[in-house]
Image (tube, grey):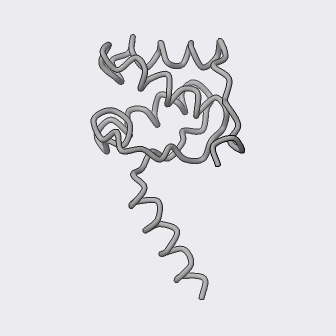
Amino acid sequence: MLADLALLPVTPDAKALAAQFLTRGTLPAKARLDAEHIAVAAVNRLAYIVTWNLKHIANPAIRTRVEALCLSEGYQPPIACTPEELLASLTNAKRSHR
């Protein structure tokens, strides 16, 4: 199953965006890997990051700051959510199309 998934590149643009998350205080310095995860998703134009990481990635308070910085740098921010949030969103979307 995992063999069918594409490995996203960590480009210089992704590294630069991750650095911005840290230097501007969007994420704490100890969250470097989380910053890189979000940046790679944004630079590669992923629609979602589905994660259990509620501390730095799917955290509503941090999410708004991440979204603002992504937009200011010219990237559409990915929607960071838990698996349950994504499933609920998809279920609600199906119901509204009936």
> How many numbered markers are drawn?
0
Direction bottom: furthest residue: 98
Give the x, y percent position of residue 44.
67, 32
Q: In this view, does 73 lie above or below 68?
A: above
Give the x, y percent position of residue 51.
42, 44
- Image side of residue 81 versus residue 72, left or right: left
Q: Is residue 88 above or below residue 18?
A: below
- Image side of residue 64 versus residue 42, left or right: left
Along the line of sight, the residue nearer the viewer: 74 or 40? 40
Q: In this view, does 4 lie above or below 71?
A: below
Q: Residue at x 60, y 20 (%)?
A: 14
Q: Residue at x 49, y 74 (%)?
A: 91
Give the x, y percent position of residue 77.
54, 38
Give the x, y percent position of residue 11.
67, 17
Q: Which residue is drawn at 49% across and 18% down?
A: 18
Q: Which residue is drawn at 47% across and 28% down?
A: 69
Quadrant hosting residue 12 = top right
Q: Quadrant of the C terminus?
A: bottom right
Quadrant hosting residue 6 = top right
